[in-house]
Amino acid sequence: MQTKFQSRPVIGVTLDSEEAGGYADFPWYALRQNYMNSLAELGAVPLALPHHAELADEYLSLCDGIVVTGGAFDVPPELFNEQQTSSQVRLKPARTEFEKAIVKGAMRRNMPLLGICGGQQLLAVLTGGTLHQHIPDALPDALEHSTTVDTENAGGKKRARHPVEIVEGSLLSRCVDRDHYEVNSSHHQAVKSVGPGCTVNAYAPDGVIEGIECEEYDFCLGVQWHPEYQQHAQDTQLLNAFVAASLRYQLSMRTAGKAMTEAMNDVIARPGNEQA
């Protein structure tokens, strides 16, 4: 029987979570629709991923790419060997544990990975980098990178905006057609340093790191802004490059699966291995 394969890449998208109250009397998941809509519009099949770290491998077996989303919470300072120094740090341990498992699993598979905002920060930390716990404390002369402490639920406030400079020769520079453009900005933390094998691909004018990527992977990239809003052509170009990389991954897995099936059939067909 011939196996049926997906023709559109499946993109796993991590959810945010909140405690009981507001929407429901029990803990609940949440995510802005534009994360999903932007991927679907570009030919992907977005798949929401609940926070079950023990199921990470099963989730990854269903996916051709992973988006680690942002949210109004932070990477625990202990993950980059620091004590918490800012009262603005907000933690969501269950979400972090799940996203750690998903990021590490995707990287082991060389599965395309896009970290957005907090997703970029987690990618930086898991590859040996560090973070500024609160930009105004660490960089008092920095631009305004966030209009509100609760960056994901901005209550209708206009997001901060600023230009970014794209590093020439980076993967990001090959995804977009401009070396500088304006991006939305909604973060109170930022990458302070990157680890081995990880490089910076974008900076704000004040020197704040706005994008990173891991060189030994087909597509392993993070940006501090939110391209899912598709406010500029370059946002769409970045997402489109990610979806294309996910399709390449799907096709490579299809080829590998076909080769494995043919090899197994060859073994079975050898004299002495035939089934009665």
Image: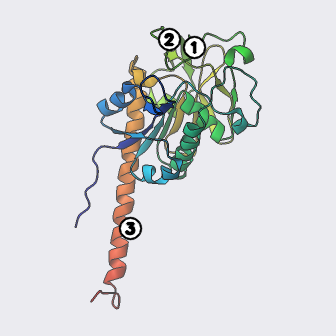
The residue beneath circle 2 is 159
Tell me: residue 167, above or below residue 51.
Answer: above
CB of mark 2 within 8 Å of CB of mark 1?
yes
The residue lying at 45 percent from left, 41 percent from top is 50
Nearer the observer: mark 3 or 2; the answer is 2
The residue lying at 43 percent from left, 49 percent from top is 59
Packing grade of label 1 (10 A; few <14, some 14-19, many >=20) is: many
Q: Secondary structure at mark 2?
A: loop
Q: Is residue 51 left or right of residue 248?
A: right
The residue beneath circle 1 is 146
Q: Secondary structure at mark 1?
A: loop
Packing grade of label 3 (10 A; few <14, some 14-19, many >=20) is: few
Question: Type of residue at label 1?
Answer: Ser
The answer to whether residue 169 shows anywhere in this view is: no
Question: Type of residue at label 2?
Answer: Arg
CB of mark 1 within 8 Å of CB of mark 3?
no
Quarter-of-image position of residue 260: bottom left
Tell me: residue 232, above or below residue 114.
Answer: above
Q: Gap between marks 1 and 3, in whole Å?
A: 50 Å
Question: Type of residue at label 3?
Answer: Met
The front one of 87 and 46 is 87
The residue beneath circle 3 is 260
Q: Quadrant of the C terminus?
A: bottom left
Tell which circle, 1 or 3, labels the residue nearer the N-terminal end.
1
Q: Which mark is residue 80?
A: none
- Report the residue that reaches farthest toward the bottom: 272
The front one of 255 and 146 is 146
- Report the residue that reaches farthest toward the left: 1
The front one of 227 and 203 is 227
